[in-house]
């Protein structure tokens, strides 16, 4: 189900943006290479969107925020798509209800691929006929980062869809298997403290929620040397943690009881295997635990005599390391055990922090409808950091902030521990 996009004409240095556009868009198609049309229309819960919807929505984003404002000659491909594939931009008009995206048997998957091709051709033509600087470049770069976010969502969503299928199929037949290895004993390293600058810096792209760069007082603390592993979380389970309310926040315990949680999402009842994007596999005790909620991470930290790090403690530690880890292009699409002295700050799993998702002092959302991108979600959610095994490498940085509700588990969500004071 892959398709190839037109290549830009080689004219000048500005074509690099067109090449990047086509590369990112092609990557989305490649993720769907082994999916069938029937796979692409299923929605298994409100948080999950069908693959077809992701393919269409990312295209709507470029049509709505790039082509219509910057290309006078462009005519909207289909007025109905504006309603069907808007996500949450209320200022752009009404949208189809999120929980009902799985009811959209039409347009067909082929019609969605045709829509992508038409928009891609128009974007490349726009770039070839104009100077792709200033606001146009900013919009395109934002759109590409938005597409990379949806590449990750596409994979986590189809994982949930396939997990609900008794056949437990694989998304891709050639995913790499990590070699079994022994991780180092969990220990704590001194963290950077004092008044420290945090947030995005430099000329590269960042989202508005990473700004403005400012200072935070970080108290003396120590940071876990790696992510918490499956084996360590299994000890937590065997110690009766899911039946001990003393370990849990009130909302967390209520959620555990209401949903009958007894183990991470995708683990089997025996806790010796888990469902992955490559189908069911034996549980690797040394790999990072994933698909756990903030509530579970927080309860484990209490059980361990520790806590979750703040997002600023995490950022200070991560900024001392290059962006290198198990990310989308690594080919595993599943967390892998730490190798050597790897601190696992990037890739593998998004790391829960104990920080509420809130605006930085002086935060200013983007102008217009794009101001709805991040700012309006700054309530009742928790900040996560570091990216996951299905995040694009170029998309991740130390200042990157994402966010989820504390009961979320369908994303690749894990954690490391922190403690007050020096190790």
Image (spheres, rainbow, N blue to C red):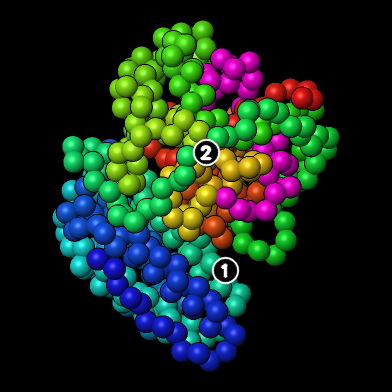
Nearer-N-terminus badge (2/1): 1
Report if residue 385 lies within the magenta region.
Answer: no
Name the residue at 62% across, 33% down. 184
In depth, the one of 79 and 99 nearer the eye is 99
In depth, the one of 232 and 351 nearer the eye is 232
Q: Position of residue 242 (x, y in %)?
A: 42, 14
In depth, the one of 67 and 12 nearer the eye is 12
Q: Circle 1 sits on which residue? A: 138
Q: Answer yes or no: do the residues labelled 2 and 1 have beta carbons within 8 Å? A: no
Q: In the rendered image, is residue 280 in sight? A: yes
Give the structural element (helix, strand or loop) at label 2: loop
- Density class for disc 2 (Cα within 10 Å; few <14, some 14-19, many ≥20) is some
Numbered range of the magenta stretch:
296-325
Number of residue marks:
2
Vertical relation: 378 (above or below) 295: below
Name the residue at 55% across, 35% down. 182
Q: Which mark is residue 105?
A: none
- Density class for disc 1 (Cα within 10 Å; few <14, some 14-19, many ≥20) is some
Image-quadrant location for residue 119: bottom left
Where's the N terminus, which quadrant?
bottom left
Name the residue at 62% across, 62% down. 205
Q: Circle 2 sits on which residue? A: 181
Q: Position of residue 251 (x, y in %)?
A: 46, 18
């Amino acid at each position: 189900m892959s398709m190839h996009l037109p290549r830009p004409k080689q004219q000048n240095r500005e074509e690099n943006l067109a090449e990047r556009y086509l590369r990112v868009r092609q990557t989305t198609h490649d993720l769907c290479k082994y999916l069938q049309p029937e796979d692409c229309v299923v929605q298994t819960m409100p948080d999950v969107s069908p693959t077809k919807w992701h393919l269409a929505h990312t295209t709507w984003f470029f049509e709505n925020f790039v082509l219509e404002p910057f290309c006078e000659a462009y005519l909207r491909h289909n007025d109905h798509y504006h309603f069907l594939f808007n996500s949450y931009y209320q200022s752009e008009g009404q949208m189809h209800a999120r929980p009902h995206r799985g009811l959209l048997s039409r347009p067909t998957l082929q019609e969605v691929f045709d829509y992508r091709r038409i928009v891609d051709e128009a974007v490349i033509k726009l770039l070839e006929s104009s100077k792709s600087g200033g606001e146009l470049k900013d919009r395109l770069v934002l759109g590409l980062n938005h597409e990379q976010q949806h590449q990750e969502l596409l994979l986590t969503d189809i994982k949930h869809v396939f997990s609900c299928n008794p056949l437990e199929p694989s998304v891709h037949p050639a995913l790499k298997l990590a070699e079994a290895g022994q991780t180092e004993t969990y220990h704590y390293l001194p963290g950077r403290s004092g008044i420290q600058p945090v947030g995005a810096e430099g000329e590269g792209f960042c989202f508005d929620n990473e700004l403005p760069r400012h200072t935070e007082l970080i108290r003396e603390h120590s940071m876990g040397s790696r992510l918490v592993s499956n084996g360590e979380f299994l000890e937590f389970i065997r110690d009766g943690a899911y039946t001990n309310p003393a370990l849990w926040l009130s909302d967390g315990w209520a959620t555990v009881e209401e949903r009958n949680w007894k183990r991470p999402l995708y683990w089997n009842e025996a806790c010796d295997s888990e469902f992955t994007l490559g189908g069911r596999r034996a549980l690797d005790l040394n790999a990072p635990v994933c698909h756990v909620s903030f509530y579970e991470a927080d309860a484990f930290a209490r059980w361990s005599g520790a806590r979750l790090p703040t997002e600023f403690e995490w950022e200070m530690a991560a900024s001392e390391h290059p962006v290198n880890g198990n990310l989308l292009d690594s080919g595993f699409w599943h967390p892998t055990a730490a190798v050597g002295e790897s601190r696992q700050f990037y890739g593998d799993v998004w790391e829960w922090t104990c920080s509420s998702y809130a605006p930085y002092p002086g935060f200013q959302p983007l102008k217009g409808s794009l101001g709805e991108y991040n700012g309006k979600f700054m309530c009742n959610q928790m900040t996560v950091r570091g990216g996951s095994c299905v995040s694009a490498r170029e998309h991740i940085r130390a200042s990157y902030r994402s966010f989820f509700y504390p009961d979320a588990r369908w994303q690749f969500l894990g954690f490391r521990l922190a403690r007050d004071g020096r190790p």
